[in-house]
Image (cartoon, grey):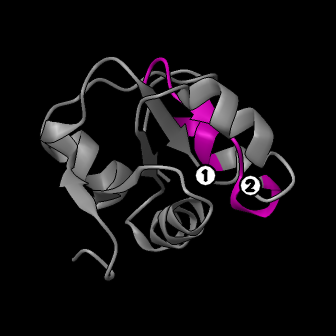
Amino acid sequence: MSFGVPAVGAGEVPDEGLLLDVREPAEWAAGHAEGAVHIPLGQVVERLPEIVELAGDGPVHVVCKAGGRSAQVTAFLQQQGVTAFNVDGGMHAWQAVGRPLVSDQGEPTVL
């Protein structure tokens, strides 16, 4: 389910580059991809310069729980001239394909 924006499967996200997690703080704390950058959806517009700087010349892969919020951010980033891809299926897909999770509070899980 691509939501009409460029998308890649969780297994296709490269290990290098910017993985932007736009979930809420409690979701992030429960479990996230190691090395991801956490900027909740509500902060994306104001933190756009930071996202652009972190991405450099590379693409931004955007992830949320299931793909809806990240699709919104992907569309916004594309409108700003940033190459961005929605991670299809979000963190649920990430976990399902066996990509590692880390947590700030014990055993990682996807909320």
| In the depicted structure, whether residue 34 falls above or below residue 55 | above
Instruction: Return the mark for residue 76.
Output: none
Marks 1 and 2, the one that precedes in the sequence: 1
Evaluate if marks 1 and 2 touch, with contact meaning CB atoms under 8 Å apart: yes
Q: Judge depth for marks 1 and 2 and give the one in front.
A: 2
Q: Which residues are magenta?
A: 27-43
Classify mark 1: residues with Cα within 10 Å, few (<14), some (14-19) or many (20+): many
Mark 1 and mark 2: Cα distance apart in space? 8 Å
Q: Helix, strand, or loop for circle 1?
A: loop
Task: Check the image and name the residue furthest to the bottom.
Answer: 4
84 shown above or below 19: below
Q: Which mark is residue 22?
A: 1
Q: Residue at x 40, y 23 (%)?
A: 17
Left or right of 12? Residue 102 is: right
46 to the left or right of 38: right
- Report which quarter residue 3 is drawn in: bottom left
Disc 2 target residue: 44
Amino acid under label 2?
Answer: Val
Residue 99 on image: x %, y %: 22, 29
Identify which residue, 67 or 59, lies in the foreground: 59
Residue 21 percent across, percent down from the top left: 55, 44
Left/right of residue 73 with respect to residue 40 in the rendered view: left
The amino acid sitting under disc 1 is Val
* Residue 20 pos. (x, y %): 53, 40
Residue sitting nearer the eye, 55 or 111: 55
Q: Is residue 17 left or right of residue 106?
A: left
Let me know if residue 1 is in the magenta part.
no
Q: Quadrant of the N terminus?
A: bottom left
Residue 63 at what x, y percent from top left? 44, 51
Is residue 98 visible in the rendered structure shown here? yes
